Amino acid sequence: MDDLVLCDGFAYQKDMTYKVSYDESYFNKCLGYEDQKIAREINAGRIAFVGKYFDDTVLDIGIGCGEFIKLRGRSHGFDVNQKAVEWLKANGVYSDDFGAYSAFTFWDVIEHIEDHDFYFRHMKKGSYLFTSLPIFTDLNRIRESRHYRPGEHLWYWTETGFVDWMAGKGFRFLERRAFEIDAGREDIYSFAFIRT
């Protein structure tokens, strides 16, 4: 696996300059999943998961097509995709003021980000972070997975590796759930953390 660097509990793409374009076609691809049965079940699970810990406005990082924001309400968004930014601004829910929030969602996003500290450093102590991402039981078998996506998925983790990696970033693990797997997704787990 010369394109990946394997570490204890996680792996990452060696050449971070190779990335897919997050553009209008990517936004439209996400839009194609909207309001499907699996999407409804996943978003219901995400909304309930956040609601267990937090009942105010969250900042959704990497909005896809904005379906979570539409369904939950009390949610603003930030994205690197210009089409998503246009949608957020048109709907009055765009924000790049990370310090104004006490909870953040990264649904299917953390594995796509090259520089996590760009986001994490703005999150104050006691704030919540919710995420969903693929979890691997064996990092030596990444290439066999449907989640092996060079240029799109830049990071890969085992469950313990992810929890430990997040602890190194200043987040304490609260809970892991499998509602996305129950809805039909393969190896996608959801996690809740709190900033320490």
Image: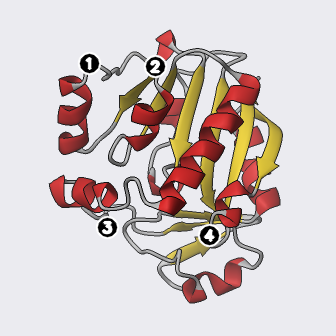
Q: Tell me where residue 145 appears, x and y as whole percent.
A: 58, 83
Tag 1: amino acid: Gly
Instruction: State how far apart marks 4 and 2 are (Cα).
Output: 32 Å
For the residues bearing labels 2 and 1, Cβ distance under 8 angstroms:
no
Q: Please tell me whether mark 3 sits on a helix, a strand or a loop.
A: loop
Q: Amino acid at mark 2?
A: Phe
Which residue lies at the image location 58% right of the left edge and 52% below the top edge?
42
Residue carrying label 3: 18
Q: Is residue 142 left or right of residue 138?
A: left
Dot 1: few (<14), some (14–19), or many (≥20) neighbours within 10 Å?
Answer: few
Please tell me whether mark 3 or mark 2 is closer to you in this view.
2
Residue at horizontal 38%, vertical 29%? 77
Binning the other alpha carbons within 10 Å of mark 4 as few (below 14), some (14 to 19) or many (20 upward) gives: some
**Distance between the alpha carbons at the discs numbered 2 and 1:** 16 Å
Mark nearest the camera among 4 and 2 is 4
- Disc 3: CA contacts within 10 A as few (<14), some (14-19) or many (>=20): few
- Point 39% across, 62% down: residue: 16
The quarter in which the C terminus is drawn is top right
Of circles 2 and 1, the one toward us is 1
Disc nearer the start of the sequence (3/2)? 3
Mark 4, residue position:
184
Labels 4 and 2: the sequence-earlier one: 2
User: Between disc 2 and disc 1, whose residue precedes?
Assistant: 1
Does residue 113 appear left or right of residue 50 in this picture? left
Instruction: Identify the residue position indicated by label 1 in the image.
Output: 92
For the residue pair 85 and 72, the one nearer the viewer reads as 72
